[in-house]
Structure formats: structure tokens, C-alpha cells
Image (spheres, rainbow, N blue to C red):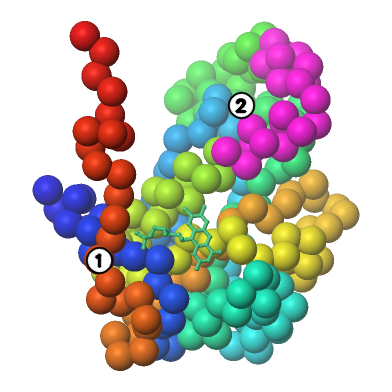
């Protein structure tokens, strides 16, 4: 029940009040994102955190302004979290997490090496678009879990795709070297109860009768 109440409480906050989110709450949200499941357990994404201040003002100016609308969450939030996903699979990005998993489980480091080789051949066989999409989809799952963790902590969080990804990558310094590409942004903070036009408006969702098809 608490989970559903948290989901009803949260909304895509349009204006925050500038109050800083406590470090413990931020850590909790990030830990939820880190614990998310991912395809083959490869965690094909990383998170960047930018705290309120000069850098965030620059990001707002460069990356969010007028894309496609002015988004006042960025100038009023406490922190901005950005999920960036890998744009392709490499042998190393498959081997490292799976070998680390074996070590964590007390197995020999090379326990999964045959599986790792087969998995690499499998994932490598798809084209670049498929690989990029596959990695990005895993980031969305982690992002969704973080959104829920924020709601549980009574921290407002706005899911955002509406920003210039190329400029974001340049700003984060990931354009060339790392093959990471930004996919999602999440400003977190506290809703501006008096000035957010969305704060008291009701949610609408597709009715259950239309949403669910039971096959019997
Ligand atoms: C992947 C994704 C991207 C979104 N991008 C933006 C965005 O760029 N700016 C924004 O204000 N809201 C954005 N939203 C918020 C949605 O408009 C919002 O979640 C939806 O209307 C449902 O409302 P609620 O979140 O308040 O329940 C996005 C939501 C999702 C899930």
C-alpha cells in the first residue's frame, strides 16, 4: 500500500523551491539506482550528479533552455542526476562485471569465462543501433527505480528526456573518450507548493479495464 501511496504522491514537478536534499536521501536514491536489475547484470549505464550552483546554471543555459520549452525544474532543483548509457558492448564491459560477480560469490575469477565469450559473440552480433538501444533500456529501468526511491523519501523528482543530449555529453566530458551517452535527466528537490502550476492538478491514467487484458 505504501508503494501505491508514494506513486500517487509523486508527480513530474515543474518548479522546485531550491531547498537542498540531504546527503542521506541522495545516497538512498543513488543506491536504489545502483541496485536495479539489468540485462545479464551488466549495468550498462553510469550516473552523473551535479549539485545546485555554477555548474548547474551552466548546464541549464546550455542543455535545457528552450529544449523544447523552458524547464524551470533545473534552475530550482537541489541536484541534477543524469543517466548515461554505453553506446555499444565491448568484451571488457561484459567480462568485468561478470568476473566481479564470480569473485563476490567466492567462485574462481574465470568461473564464467565460457559464458562471457558466448555472451560477447551474441551481443556483438547486433548492429550499433540495437546495442545502443539495449543499453539505454537498462538505464530507463534504473531511472524508474530511482524515481520510486525518491518518492519513498518524499523527495520530488522529475523524469526528463527533454534536453540536448549532444550538448549534455560535451558538458559532462563524455563526447569522445568513454562511449557513454546521456539518455535521461532527473532533477531532484522539493516542490514549490505556491508556484508550481502542476502541484494540485489531478493525475490521469488509462483505466484498468483498458490497460489490462486478461487471457483466460
Ligand atoms: C521518460 C520520460 C521523459 C519525460 N521528459 C520530461 C521532460 O523533459 N520535461 C518534463 O517536464 N516532464 C517530462 N516527463 C514527465 C511526464 O510528462 C509525466 O511523467 C507524465 O505526464 C505523467 O505525469 P506524472 O509524472 O506527474 O504522474 C517525462 C516522463 C518520462 C517517463
What segment carries the magenta color? 117-137
**Residue at 62% over, 42% down:** 136
Compared across the picture, whether 60 is left or right of 151 comes to right
Residue position for label 2: 99
Tell me, for residue 65, which label it has, or none: none
- Is there a contact, CB below 8 Å, between mark 2 and mark 1? no
**Total marks in image:** 2
Nearer to the camera, 158 or 26: 158
Q: Which residue is mark 1?
A: 202
Query: Vertically, is 138 above or below 19?
Result: above
Crowding near the residue tagged with mark 1, few <14, some 14–19, many ≥20 C-alpha atoms within 10 Å = few
Determine whether the residue tagged by mark 1 lies in a helix, strand or loop: loop
Position of residue 20 measured from the top left corner of the image (x, y, whole percent) = 41, 84
Pick out the residue farthest to the right. 176
The answer to if 27 sits in the magenta stretch is no
Name of the residue lying farthest toward the left: 1
User: What residue is shown at x 71% (from left), y 43% (from top)?
Assistant: 86
Percent position of residue 102, x then y: 53, 24
- Left or right, 13 with respect to 115, comes to left
- The percent coordinates of residue 202 (x first, y second) are 25, 66
Q: Is residue 78 visible?
A: no
Q: Is residue 191 visible?
A: yes
Amino acid at each position: 500500500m505504501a508503494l501505491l501511496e508514494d506513486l500517487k504522491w509523486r508527480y513530474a514537478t515543474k518548479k522546485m523551491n531550491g531547498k537542498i536534499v540531504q546527503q542521506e536521501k541522495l545516497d538512498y536514491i543513488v543506491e536504489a539506482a545502483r541496485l536495479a536489475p539489468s540485462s545479464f547484470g551488466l549495468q550498462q549505464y553510469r550516473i552523473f550528479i551535479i549539485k545546485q550552483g555554477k555548474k548547474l546554471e551552466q548546464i541549464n543555459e546550455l542543455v535545457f533552455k528552450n529544449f523544447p520549452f523552458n524547464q524551470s525544474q533545473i534552475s530550482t532543483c537541489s541536484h541534477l542526476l543524469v543517466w548515461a548509457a554505453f553506446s555499444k558492448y565491448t568484451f571488457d564491459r561484459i567480462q568485468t562485471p561478470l568476473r566481479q560477480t564470480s569473485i563476490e560469490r567466492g567462485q574462481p575469477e574465470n568461473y564464467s569465462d565460457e559464458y562471457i565469450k558466448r555472451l560477447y559473440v551474441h551481443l556483438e552480433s547486433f548492429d550499433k543501433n540495437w546495442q545502443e538501444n539495449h543499453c539505454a533500456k537498462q538505464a530507463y529501468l534504473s531511472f524508474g527505480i530511482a524515481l520510486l526511491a525518491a518518492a519513498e523519501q518524499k523527495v520530488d523528482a522529475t523524469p526528463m528526456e527533454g534536453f540536448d543530449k549532444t550538448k549534455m555529453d560535451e558538458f559532462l566530458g563524455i563526447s569522445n573518450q568513454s562511449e557513454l551517452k546521456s539518455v535521461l535527466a532527473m532533477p531532484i528537490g522539493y516542490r514549490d507548493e505556491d508556484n508550481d502550476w502542476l502541484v494540485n492538478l489531478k493525475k490521469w491514467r488509462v483505466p484498468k479495464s483498458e490497460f489490462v487484458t486478461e487471457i483466460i
